[in-house]
């Protein structure tokens, strides 16, 4: 029994550490990438030495670094800010909402297959678990908008709810096609099915396992991947799908009235959701922890599997940030048209195509 509690404590500690590191690194990358896109330098002044001096009450000197400690400094700043609750707000729900949103994101990390030997919860319905738990955050977002007693917050939460519920359909259908192809809901099983050279990855139709007939799947899998990627952007409210947070219309959306660490929790949950969304894409379409070169995978280099998985994930995160600082925001009607007129029909087409492939060809 003691060993079980010890294992749970170690697992939770590792997950908390992973979520924290993901948030800190993602926020830093966001700032640097946005600065690069806008011909700026981004965070430059706050190094770890200056951060230590500031905590110790000493004079903060310019270090000329690249701002690696900026995210930590922002976290310390938010910890010191006043926690304001608006008059007329439902205090209990107002406090509970960010916790629910964060819990929904945090819980999904348990089923991410970072490596064959490092899956906190290797359950046989891992993909179903992630989809179910990730949608839990919708309740928290709606709760945040309603409980704040702010019309902009309520409108932002309603927009976000409609957007997330709509785009869960193409995301779910695109992933079900992978489940049908592999015959398992286990995240580990789906990744293991892509072992070997990179052309065994589902994005390329798993040609290595299915032979030349696998090329029939190639366009279907590419469509599925694109539909999933676009859907994950919309579900995390990232540009060009950041309509729930449109500054010119809704101030800051459903977290307009939030300050201090509750505000920070929303953003930590957002960047955690971005990591999870792209990690699922890596696991289901891009070979997971396999590098695509058998010699590397079979070399038994310590730590290479989770490193490959995380590097692939951050490459996709870079693309997400690149898109944010490149494309303008869509209108609400354009957002829904893209989902209901294009993504859902395309993913349904690929779903039935994969079903026909499994029944009549394989």
Image: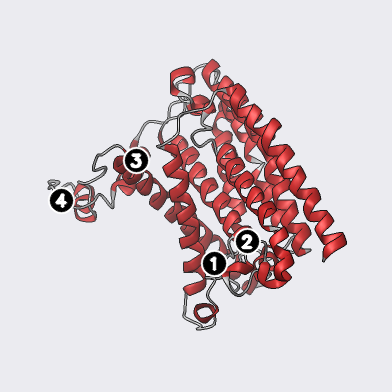
In this rendered view, identify the residue nearer to me: 8 or 40.
40
Which callout, 4 or 2, points at the residue further toward the start of the chain? 4
Mark 3 or 2: in front is 2
Mark 4 or 2: in front is 2
**Which residue reaches farthest right?**
360
Mark 1 or 4: in front is 4
> What residue lies at 49% left-to-right and 52% top-to-bottom?
316
Whether residue 111 appears in this view of the structure is: no
**Does dot 2 land on a helix, a strand or a loop?**
helix
- Percent across and percent down for residue 249 are 48, 18
The disc placed on residue 204 is: 2
Which callout, 1 or 3, points at the residue further toward the start of the chain? 1
Q: Is residue 322 left or right of residue 88?
A: left
> What residue lies at 61% left-to-right and 35% top-to-bottom?
140
- Percent across and percent down for residue 324 are 44, 38
Residue at which label 1 appears: 10
């Amino acid at each position: 029994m003691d060993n079980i509690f010890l294992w749970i404590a170690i697992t939770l500690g590792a997950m908390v550490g992973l979520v924290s590191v993901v948030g800190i690194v993602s926020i830093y990358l966001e700032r640097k990438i946005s600065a690069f896109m806008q011909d700026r330098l981004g965070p430059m002044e706050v190094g770890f030495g200056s951060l230590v001096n500031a905590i110790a009450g000493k004079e903060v000197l310019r270090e000329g670094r690249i701002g690696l400690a900026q995210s930590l400094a922002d976290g310390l700043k938010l910890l010191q800010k006043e926690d304001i609750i608006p008059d007329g707000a439902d205090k209990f729900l107002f406090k509970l909402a960010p916790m629910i949103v964060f819990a929904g994101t945090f819980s999904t990390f348990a089923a991410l297959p970072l490596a064959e030997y490092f899956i906190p919860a290797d359950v046989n319905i891992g993909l179903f678990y992630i989809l179910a738990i990730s949608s839990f955050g919708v309740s928290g977002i709606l709760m945040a908008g309603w409980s704040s007693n702010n019309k902009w917050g309520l409108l932002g939460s309603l927009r976000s709810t409609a957007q997330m519920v709509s785009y869960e359909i193409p995301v779910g259908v695109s992933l079900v096609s992978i489940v049908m192809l592999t015959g398992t809901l286990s995240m580990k099983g789906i990744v293991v099915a892509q072992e070997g050279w990179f052309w065994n990855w589902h994005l390329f139709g798993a040609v290595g396992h299915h032979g030349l007939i696998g090329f029939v799947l190639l366009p279907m899998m590419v469509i599925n991947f694109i539909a999933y990627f676009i859907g994950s952007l919309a579900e995390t409210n990232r540009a060009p799908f950041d309509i729930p947070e449109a500054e010119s219309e809704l101030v800051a959306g459903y977290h307009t009235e939030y300050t201090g660490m509750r505000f920070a929790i929303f953003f930590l949950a957002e960047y955690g959701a971005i990591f999870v969304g792209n990690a699922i894409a890596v696991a289901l379409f891009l070979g997971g922890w396999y590098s695509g070169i058998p010699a590397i995978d079979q070399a038994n280099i310590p730590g290479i599997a989770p490193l490959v998985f995380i590097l692939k994930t951050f490459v996709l995160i870079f693309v997400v940030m690149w898109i944010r600082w490149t494309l303008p925001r869509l209108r609400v009607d354009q957002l829904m048209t893209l989902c209901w007129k294009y993504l859902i029909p395309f993913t349904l087409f690929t779903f039935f195509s994969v079903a026909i492939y499994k029944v009549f060809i394989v």
